[in-house]
Amino acid sequence: MRPLSGIKVLDLSRVLAGPLCTMILADLGAEVIKVEPPWGDETRGWGPPFVQGESAYFLSVNRGKRSLALDLKTPEGQEVVRRLAQGADVLVENFKTGDLKRYRLDYESLKELNPRLVYLSITGFGHTGPRAQEPGYDAALQGYTGIMSVTGEPAGPPMKVGVAWIDVMTGMMGAVAVLAALLERERSGLGQHIDLSLFDVGLFALANLGESYLLTGKPPKRLGNAHAQIVPYGAFPAADGWLVLAVGNDEQFARLCQVLDLPDLLKRFPTNPQRVEAREEVVEALSAVLRTQPRAYWLQRCKEAGIPAAPVNDLAEAFQDPQAQARGAIWTLSHPLLGPLPTLANPLRFLSRTPAKPSLPPPLLGEHTEEVLRKAGYAPEEVARLVEKGVVRTAPQRKG
């Protein structure tokens, strides 16, 4: 038994934030039906890389779901969703504000059919405010929320985070919101509408930098790999690569100066506020010594001295790290086209009694259309008629 066993989720979302949210719910045991258009979620075509025609992007966030390929622009397709929503616990969608209202698939319409429905809407800017009608793309939201202004080298251009950072966090916050609403439903017996926006999540995730601006009125500047309020804290060059030093207090800095044989630096800048004020001088002094030896040498010395340090790994090194292997960072699933499919393991896999677990591999487009429709009460001839009219699309069933 998993935490969300028995919970039924209707997933009308595409691309990243919504699918990541519903994959988390699926890993926790929810039954997730992914409703996608007959031509598929956009990310099925995003690549390379593709393997046997399957997109790595799509495979990354759609584990554990059943695919219902359905044309929502048709009255018959809209009726299918309404029928499924009557028996669902959760609906997740990321259409532009107002789009689903045209089909009577918005929260106000569906709660009349199912008052217990938890309905999560993910948009770029939310359902209120002057930008409510604007589309939301992660790169644009990284610009709007200011994270690009503090990412990158001081003399360089603004930089976005290497992954769709706000989309990923919005998916995670969406899962938190759904779980909170399901818990509250146990007391009230009622569902509710969750209006979650990438914009709100991006601002919230500014954390200490956002709070620093609120207190001082001064926007933080780009510091590259450095920390705005701690020195030394960031990436440094060794003779054969890069390492990270995360010196969080003055005692650790004193030990670092011993390791690097820099007693004068410790004497001049023993406290963190002093080091922040003299950031460039401190960093250059440390870098000059660190460049003289290989990365492994300094990592070992720092480990022996109790100084937080780490390699700057590429992804191959990250997944081959003994800790990643010991903790089972990869879940391998059996895919009907690809065979053994490695996927990113859910970090919630360490709940002591009800851990997250993988279930189904990412679905083929329309793979479960017939199964879902029949469970919803459609007779075989009705399914065949919907297929013939192009309302739904089917795909071969898995073998075995």
Image: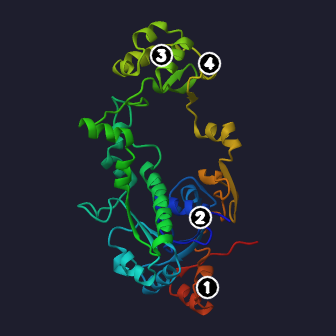
Residue at 34% from the left image edge and 79% from the top image edge = 102
Relative to 67, say whether 50 is above or below: above
Which image quadrant is residue 354 in? bottom right
Which residue is under mark 3?
286
The type of residue carrying mark 1 is Arg
Report if residue 65 is visible in the image. Answer: yes
Q: Which residue occupies the foreground of this view, 238 or 56?
A: 238
How crowded is the residue under tag 4: few (<14 C-alpha within 10 Å), some, or many (20+)? some
Report if residue 11 is visible in the image. Answer: no
The type of residue carrying mark 2 is Ala
Mark before the other along the chain sequence, 1 or 3: 3
Left or right side of 81 for 374: right
Evaluate if marks 2 and 3 touch, with contact meaning CB atoms under 8 Å apart: no
Which residue is under mark 2?
26
Q: Kindly report the distance in space between the C-alpha atoms of the residues bearing marks 1 and 2.
A: 21 Å
3 vs 4, front mark = 4
Q: Secondary structure at mark 1?
A: helix
Mark before the other along the chain sequence, 2 or 4: 2
Which residue is under mark 4?
301
